[in-house]
Image (spheres, grey):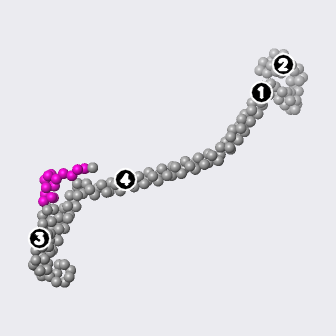
Amino acid sequence: MNTQLLAEFPELGHLSRQDLEDLLTDQEYFQAVFMGLPRVQAMLQSVVELGRANEAIANKNLSLRDSLFRLRSETQQAFDEAKALEARSKQLEREQKELHQRYTASFLLMRLRHATTALEEQSESTATSFVQGTPSDGNGSPMDVEDFIRTFKEQRVQYHKRAIWGEQWAAGKVTWPEH
């Protein structure tokens, strides 16, 4: 009997035609013969071995579970700390930039010009108060001549010093080292 069935499953070659027909009709007989085939036995053995290997891997994973959770927690803490340090670094860079901005040449020139203008207005106010005889020092009495001369002279000397610095700076004769 040379059929395609026997060509693919030579293990069934010892069965008679009646046995082959019984395989088709009797489910229990089919299961018994099928499970007895060497290929099926090898496959079942492979399934059992894979099951054992999976169980061993699962047990190993369970044994590593606590250390993995601890490692994850430590990693999260390190990540959070790194993020906080990064934010702090950005804040410090902003503060450093703001502090450095206060000492740039252009900012210092602007401050000099504002101080010069304020000092000029203050000296003019002192002169106006003296001429009008109104109190300028807040104690209720007008300034005497000597106090006026001393105060006005100090204010004007300071004003002219600042004005000269501003003119020198505008003329490019003042340089500031940039850091």
> Is residue 127 visible from the viewing direction of this image?
no
Question: From mark 2 to mark 1, how far is it between C-alphas?
Answer: 19 Å
Is 143 in the magenta?
no
Residue 177 in the figure: left or right of residue 59: left
Q: Which residues are magenta?
A: 164-178
Amino acid tagged 3 = Lys
Of the residues shown, which amino acid type is indicated by label 1? Ala
**Residue neighbourhood size for the residue with mark 1, other residues' Cα within 10 Å, grouped as few (<14), some (14–19), many (≥20):** few
Closer mark to the observer between disc 1 and disc 3: 3
Q: Which residue is pictured at 20% across the width and 82% down the height?
A: 139
> Are discs 1 and 4 less than 8 Å apart at CB?
no
What secondary structure is marked by label 2? helix
The label number, if any, that marks residue 153 in the structure image: 3
Mark 4 or mark 2: name the one nearer the start of the chain.
2
User: Residue 42: which disc?
Assistant: 1
Name the residue tied to disc 2. Answer: 13
For the view shown, which residue lies furthest in the top direction?
2
